[in-house]
Amino acid sequence: MPRDDEPLRARLNALATCYPRYGYLLLHALLRQEGLVVNRKRTYRLYREAGLQVRTRRRKRLVRPRAPMPCPDRPNQRWSMDFVSDQLASGRRFRVLNIVDDFSRECVGKLVDTSISGRRLARFLDDIAQQRALPASVVCDNGPELTSKAMFFWARERKVTLAFIQPGKPTQNAFIESFNGKFRDGCLNQH
């Protein structure tokens, strides 16, 4: 004997119109509260047949204008920074911060430690500044150390622009990524 799904289907559509962000489980709970005792699978079948699937909201990405970074024409105009992680034979992880001058491709500095905070990074950059001039800008990714308040204040006090690459686009920081690949291959993978 076939079931008459029309009253249930009509009520399901009415509830879905009132609550457009509800999925079939919440709508099923509302139907049960109203006394329309139905099987959850039946509610799902009617929900699917009516095409009431809730669309998942797409995550909004931060829109930044894409502009190619001009190549530097003198040393200490722009540096690039990035981290490389590895682990010791004991299993303890460590990180290496590499800083490269984009014009000369010279490694300006390396900081090796098991934990590198934004404050520690700012102190290290000040140590480098005692030996050579600071750049006009530093290109880096969006890691927590590089986006910290300590780095923001350090850059503002020294009039250095922090140029962050877009998330998930390491090619925008190609000089340091190339250096890190060679560093990993020639140093970290050897030991």
Image: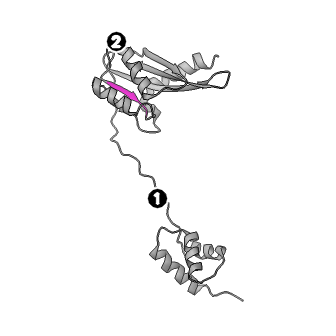
Name the residue rendered at 61%, 72% in the picture.
Answer: 44
Q: Is residue 17 above or below residue 88?
A: below
Q: Is residue 139 magenta?
A: yes
> 189 or 34, which is in the foreground?
34
Look at 52% across and 19% down and name the residue there. Answer: 112
| Closest to the observer, 72 or 145 | 145
Which residues, given as a range, are shown in magenta? 137-141
Residue plotted at (46% across, 76% down): 17
**Residue 66 visible in the current orientation:** yes
Q: Residue, x 34% and y 30% (percent of image)?
A: 162
Kindly identify the amino acid type of the residue bearing the numbered disc 1.
Arg
Mark 2–mark 1 Cα distance, whole angstroms, equals 49 Å
* Secondary structure, magenta segment, majority class: strand
Q: How crowded is mark 2: few (under 14 residues within 10 Å), some or many (20 or more)?
A: few
For residue 6, which quarter of the picture? bottom right
Q: Which residue lies furthest to the bottom in this view?
A: 1
Disc 2 target residue: 132
Q: Is residue 132 magenta?
A: no
Image spot of residue 91 (x, y percent): 66, 26
Residue 33, position as x, y percentages in the image: 57, 79
Element marked by disc 1: loop
- Among the 4 quarters of the image, the one containing residue 89: top right
Q: Which residue is at the front of the view, 90 or 191?
A: 90
Quadrant where the N terminus sits is bottom right
* Count of number-bearing discs: 2
- Residue 70 in view of the camera: no
Residue 60: x %, y % from top left? 41, 51
Reply above or below: 1 against 12: below
Residue 183 screen position, x and y as percent: 54, 19
Residue that badge 1 annotates? 57
